[in-house]
Amino acid sequence: MLSAFSKYAGIIQTVLGLVGTAAPSAVPALGAAQGGSIFNLISGLVLSYLGFKGGESQQRVGALGLGGLNAVVGVLGALGVSNIAGISLNTETVGIIVNLAVGAWGLISGLMKKKAA
């Protein structure tokens, strides 16, 4: 589950970030803010790299770190916080749901014990 999280969540966030960054007019349709698109792009690229090139311990740290960060961003967006230090956060339902889902998936993946072989 850890490797799958890193790969698939990374790809999903990278695509959302690329679309939002390359086509700013699509940002509202994606439910993201411009800062949210950049966050999704960077988070997605890091997760994808860890998923395809990283070892298990690196994937675990990435899942916990970026999962936790996504969860915080999702909760802040749900509470109506739209800006932190000049960076726009997702305030639309779709963006908040993506951040919360990636956050929960990452935290669960990172905290799960490795299955015995």
Image (cartoon, rainbow, N blue to C red):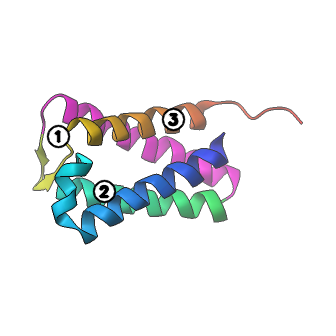
Q: CA distance from mark 2 to mark 3?
A: 17 Å
Corner quadrant of residue 109: top right
Q: Are marks 2 and 3 in contact (CB under 8 Å)?
A: no
Relative to 30, is 51 on the left or the right?
Answer: right
Q: What's the residue at 66%, 39% (across, down)?
A: 1
Q: Which residue is mark 3?
A: 105
Q: CA distance from mark 3 to mark 1?
A: 20 Å
Q: What's the residue at 50%, 41% (across, down)?
A: 64
Crowd class of label 3 (few under 14; some 14 to 19; many from 20; radius 10 Å): many
Disc 1 on helix, strand or loop?
loop
Residue 10 lies within the magenta run: no
Q: Which residue is mark 1?
A: 91
Question: Which of the two labelled residues, at mark 2 and mark 3, occupies the earlier sequence position?
Answer: 2
Crowd class of label 2 (few under 14; some 14 to 19; many from 20; radius 10 Å): many
Q: Which residue is mark 2?
A: 39
Q: Are marks 1 and 2 in contact (CB under 8 Å)?
A: no
Corner quadrant of residue 15: bottom left
| Residue 58 in the image, given as x and y percentages of width and height | 61, 54
Question: Which of the two labelled residues, at mark 3 and mark 1, occupies the earlier sequence position?
Answer: 1
